[in-house]
Amino acid sequence: MLDHTIAAISTSLSASGIGIVRISGDEAIAIADRLFQSHKKKQLKDQKTHTLHYGHIVDPKEDEIVDEVLVSIMRGPDTYTKEDIIEINGHGGVIVMQRILQLVLTHGATLAEPGEFTKRAFLNGRLDLSGAEAVIDIINAKTNLGLKSSMHQLKGAVYYHVEEVRREILELMAHIEASIDYPEYDIEELSDDHVMGKLERIAKGIHKMIQSSEVGKMIREGIKTAIVGKPNVGKSSLLNALLKEDRAIVTDIAGTTRDVLEEYMNLLGIPVRIMDTAGIRQTDDEVEKIGVTKSKAVVEDADLVIMMLDASQKITKEDRYILDLVVDKQVIVLLNKIDLSMEIKEDDIRALIEGVTVIPTSVVDERGLEELQKVIKDMFLLGDIAMDDGLYITNVRHKVSLERALKSVEAVKASIQMGMPEDCWSIDLKNAYGDLGEITGDHVSDDLIEEIFSQFCLGK
Ligand code: GDP
Ligand code: ZN
């Protein structure tokens, strides 16, 4: 499967400054030599590894120059795929890139499938599966913190933590097998209490990783935050004020989901994904009229709801309607426009939603905004996210495998408590070991590998 040489355009498929055709495999250098005329009239095969060469790509059949290029030669195993890699840097036009790729294909390479370069990195043992998945996440990162976490994963954070638990399971399995195979040895360490203690430790380790996925999800996606309230309470003003303060807007990707505008921002280092029911860039009244209807859908979906009221006026029916919608959510109520007057008291709101956080604000005077950010930070315990000493599971597939592994470990504990024989324990232990191996790719079906790498883009 790995014996053919693959090639693809690895840069964006639209006009750009440069474009790269990447070739990986045993034939990579030979193929490039058939097409590349170096400025110095030297063959690539005689060049040192990790060097860059200027020249032209020439269609040998037509003897026609196709592009002026720089070619880099990287010999395995110190490469992305661990194989020989050639990268042809050309002018990034669509036609030029396609012609170069076509020439590479007619001279011996096979078109790479999406993710095939990274798949080779995995199959050749340069990356574990979670590390390969981190590559997709890096490309798709929506927040700075998400990027940081994916880099951490690429460097082996998930692998390391999972392998640690797997080692403990393996050790325990070895002990149990030994006591089954050599019952004449009285293996003292195999008392039920001892095994139970080890299992508790293993379960705790897995549980901790599962727990981290809650924060992990927010790192990856941002805290899904909905700003709701009837028209004119100051929602758009709040959003603008927050965005203005945030000099490092994570991306300027503004998407529309269910007619709701989204914007990513970075509040005190926390990735927040704000969904504005009334329009971020539009202040069009028509849009705001239907705000209440849309609030409903957005609220359902949100991790956090910021509910705004105009404190300079008495509570209206509309306010109560929206308050009803948010009762069961993580909610912060803002009493806005306190620069005008305060017709609504904090306690009025607390009487409606028990224990809710109420912050008086004036968006115009920038009062209460700092407190709002602090409250959000405390609410989601994201205060001290430091990637270096922690692990956050951001991948749902990993979470599912961890949950399965935990179940198996709990099953072993139950077997012991019910006094089942030792060979029963090993079956569930083996399952737990396998489930965790799915995360690192040590124990994984071809179908799953196919599925994971099919999510990649072409040329990666
Ligand atoms: P939205 O319909 O909820 O998005 O409300 P807007 O953000 O469009 O604000 C409606 C009006 O209220 C605008 O004229 C704002 O300038 C004004 N406004 C927003 N916040 C405050 C505030 O804290 N104090 C005062 N006095 N006016 C505000
Ligand atoms: Zn608005």
Image (tube, grey):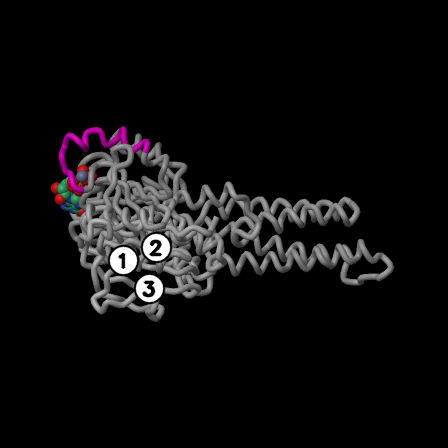
Q: Is residue 286 magenta?
A: yes
Residue at the spot x=84%, y=62% of the render?
185
x and y percent of residue 357 in the render? 35, 47
Contact between labelled residues 3 and 1, with CB atoms less than 8 Å apart = no
Q: Amino acid at mark 3?
A: Ile
Q: For disc 3, does the CB lie below 8 Å from ligand 2?
A: no
Residue at the spot x=39%, y=65% of the render?
75
- The answer to whether residue 374 shows anywhere in this view is no
x and y percent of residue 227 in the render? 27, 41
Query: In the picture, residue 162 is in which quadrant?
Result: bottom right
The secondary structure type at the circle numbered 3 is strand
Contact between labelled residues 1 and 2, with CB atoms less than 8 Å apart = yes
The residue beneath circle 2 is: 23
Please give left or right for residue 271 compared with residue 166 in the image.
left
The residue beneath circle 1 is: 88
The secondary structure type at the circle numbered 2 is strand
Query: In the picture, residue 146 is in which quadrant?
Result: bottom left
The residue beneath circle 3 is: 73
Q: For disc 2, does the CB lie below 8 Å from ligand 2?
A: no
* Distance between mark 1 and mark 3 Cα atoms: 9 Å
x and y percent of residue 418 in the render? 77, 44
Q: Is residue 439 magenta?
A: no
Mark 2 Cα shell of 10 Å, populated few (<14), some (14-19), many (≥20) = many
Q: Amino acid at mark 2?
A: Ile
Tag 3 or tag 2, which sits nearer the N-term?
A: 2
Please give left or right for residue 149 compared with residue 424 in the image.
left
Quadrant containing ligand 1 reads top left
